[in-house]
Image (cartoon, coloured by chain):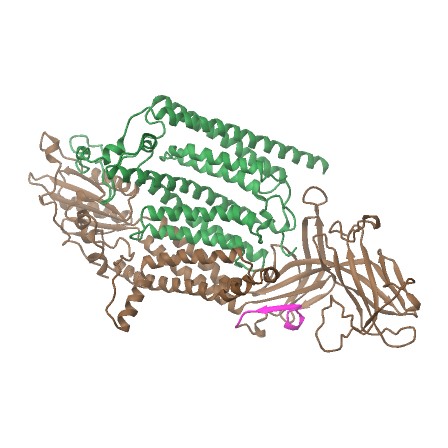
Chain colours: A green, B brown
Amino acid sequence: MILAAATNENLAEISNVLIYSAMAVYTLAFFAYIAEWTFGSRSKVARTASALTPGTQAKKAPAVTVKQGGGTAVLERPKVVVRAASGSRDVPDGPGAHGGDEKGDLYGRIAISLTVLAFLLSLGGVLTRALSVERAPWGNMYEFNITFSTTAVGVYLILLALRKNVRWLGLFLTTTVLLDLGVAVTWLYTESDQLVPALHSYWLYIHVSTAILCGAVFYVGAVGTILYLFKDAYENKLAKGGKPGSFATSVMERLPASATLDKFAYRVNAAVFPLWTFTIIAGAIWAGDAWGRYWGWDPKETWSFITWVAYAGYLHARATAGWKGRKAAYLALLAFGCWLFNYYGVNIFVSGKHSYADVGLGALAAVGF
Amino acid sequence: MSKTTTDGAPTAADDQDLGAAGSQLSTAPTEDAPHLPALGVIGWARWFWRQLTSMRVALLLLLLLSLAAIPGSLIPQTGVDETKVADFRERHDVLAPVYDKLGLFHVYSSVWFSAIYILLFISLIGCILPRTWQFVGQLRGRPPGAPRRLTRLPAHTTWRTGTPPEEVREAALALLKKRRFRAHVVGDAVAAEKGYLREAGNLLFHIALIVMLIAFAWGQLFKSEGNKLIVEGDGFSNTLTQYDDFKSGNLFTNDDLEPFSFDVKEFTGTYERTGPNKGTPRTYQSEVTYTEGADGEEKTAVVKVNKPLELGDAKVYLVSHGYAPVVTVRDGKGEIVFQDAVPLLPLDANVTSSGVVKVLDGYRNPEGKKEQLGFNAFFVPTFGGSESGTMLSQFPALDYPVLALSAYHGDLKADSGIPQSVYQMDKTKMKEFKDSEGELFKKLLTPGETMTLPDGAGSVTFEKDVKEWAGFQVVQEPGGGWALGGAVVAIAGLAGSLFIQRRRVWVRAVEGPDGVTVVEMAGLGRSESAKVPEELGDLAGILYDRAPGAPDPAPDPSDSTDLDPDPDPEAVPSEGAEKP
């Protein structure tokens, strides 16, 4: 018994060391991303500008020209010509943070390698934490936070591994992950401990893990949305013949086209929306078992409902005339704001049945106590 | 629903090119510009209905709903925690009446919140009914024919082949059907469509939402919820009179109560001994034996937090726990006049408890007169020691139980007909027992100890056996199954509507001027997706194997770029399209 407790304390210690190491490596990754952006600024490619600046537009090659597959190459497939939908700007994606610069690209690759390393360290931190408490590591906000950042980076790395165009996310992601972990170790740190009986349920694994995953994906979507808003404003300015500042040009030119960012954000949000629905329903089922009612307008429930409705609004807005584009993007940010408030705000400012997730308050929370 | 094709002012000439071919890839309503109707009740009603069922208003209602839900999470709600509401009323004597008027203490059953979601659901029904109808029409119809200029579509490919056009079309038709497209030949082209499940999922999702709402409302109306405190060894049968307190929905009748009974064998609680969470429960469960129906078989079960006992429609939850010290009261002659476990109510997390021991019958005072006895009881499972200066419990387990009693005699007024709390004493007709100094007679007892009342009035023994009690909540909420079913269908429908692409593919094969067949393929999805060109490439690759390429006739490939025989770019060639 005593021996077991000692091992557990050791594991908790190891977990802390791993989390701090992850933060250190994320910091290095952060600087590497900065280097990537800095070296990338040497490139003078301005594809967006040339696509949108009046006068240069005529040079654009007509989209519908290529015909292939004829000739004698029998094994060759006919080539599919893709054409942008009417009404949307035909803007090419930027080259990425490195801007085509070799040194920038090198630093970008270093940054990604460091991100992978930091991810593995924080994953180790989460796992050792779980082992130290012999349960799912989602019993308090500290544990939520470290799992959340691990998951968010995991989502990013998976998208990268799937060869999606997401390298531009790196800097923004590591910045916030550092903030998230900093908040976790500074304010939210809680000694590892067991759970109150109300949390002894397999629904903990289902409900909380999906909630964290949804948050991480929503977060990635929100970063895409914010960048979309900036890039869209940049493109609008160019299209109107304006001349954005040199810093804006340097950064924006390297980001994907606003349409790409918008599509990315939409896909990410739409993909995870059913999972969020599931999270709420799983929570309701658990609430039915634990609290005697599956829906009781507890603050956490209410805010997850508000978040759900806000994201539903966003998905509808994208299909509604007059709401597409920027307005829908604002809605998406609002929805993510609701998610954030549901996580931090409700845990810290509002007391409810979910308050065992509270900052170090521990105890007291189980049903009827 | 001709609206879809005629309306919606396309923003670019390209859209007109697609004509009917691009239409009805979804049944999403088109947006009319808001226009004022002609006067008249019917005109207004129609205008109102159209507004209500428009996407724009539905969107606003959605946002309004999320906004309206916010106050309920910040202001205490009667449905969630009534003591907090009372507390709030006490602290805000100006705000509270205003909140009361606005229904802010019960936001989710308030008029305005209800108005929003009822309008939203009417809007929803008004939207999905015509869409379902339209979708059925699309299912019964066939994919629209190819637009004349396939090059205008988002994904397009073409090649020349020696295979005759009919054979190409046949091969294309077979291929598309094999890929589970709905396909048919219209004129010189094959028209195919796939992904109807998107629309089906969308409709299913929205219908499931309505089912969930109805199930929830149904549950609220027929719901019942009662609490019962049971000491180890005691039992309960599910009738209204047995409950300590009971709430029910508007349409609940007593016959709806599920017939069952159960006995509490034992309550087990263990608590964290050390660390910052000292005192936090670790195990918390109650062993019960129960029978279902009037005379069912006796079974045993363990009721835990998260693991209610399910008996028919009813669920029995373990919600609270406390101690019930066994107390024996003897009169002056040493006859036992009272011996029972007295449940006491916990006051804090360490189960400092209080209550009353009432001796109603059988006691005669030393003068031989009938009297009633009352003892204010204060109990701590873990006493801090007399030098600690506190009577508050230090730990929730029975480590050092101490019972403090103060004694009264007289009339408890229990027979006055007014219901009385078993945890409180009406002292208006009670007199204090006095100690030697003339103060209220009171004493701290450890298990097994006896205190002797002054003047030979008898004695009170705190028996060694301290029992525990468990508080149960019995909830019956019908409609839960429907709500769950609705939820599952909603997720499935949502996944279908978000992950499935509805897309059309056209394959045109015509004989060119030089006798060589020109094959053109084009794909169209509702949203721009990389999947549409990918799939088109796959299909084209397979078809290309069946109808291999023929050499280009012209040495300069730039001459052959425009295969379109129609030189007029503004043409609107949608005649060939078939309406569902």
* Residue B240 colored in magenta in the image: yes
Q: Nearer the viewer, residue B480 or A312?
A: A312
* Residue A123 colored in magenta in the image: no
Q: Whole-percent x and y of residue B131?
A: 30, 60
Quadrant of the image for the N terminus of chain A? top right
Q: Judge whether B156 appears above or below B495 on screen.
A: above
- Residue stretch rendered in magenta on the structure: B237-250
Q: Quadrant of residue B164?
A: top left
Q: Whole-percent x and y of residue A192?
A: 63, 39
Q: Whole-percent x and y of residue B371?
A: 85, 74
Marker count (numbered): 0
Q: Quadrant of residue B516?
A: top left
Is residue A344 visible in the rendered image? The answer is: yes
Quadrant of the image for the C terminus of chain A? bottom right
| Outermost residue to the left | B513
Is residue A90 visible in the rendered image? The answer is: no
Q: Quadrant of residue B487?
A: bottom left
Q: Is residue B22 left or right of residue A365?
A: left
| Outermost residue to the top | A103
Q: Judge whether A120 appears above or below B407 on screen.
A: above
Q: Nearer the viewer, residue B31 or B475?
A: B31
- The residue positioned 52% from the left and 64% from the top of the image is B98
Q: Whole-percent x and y of residue B186?
A: 16, 52
Q: Nearer the viewer, residue B120 or B273?
A: B120
Q: Is residue B12 left or right of residue B262?
A: left
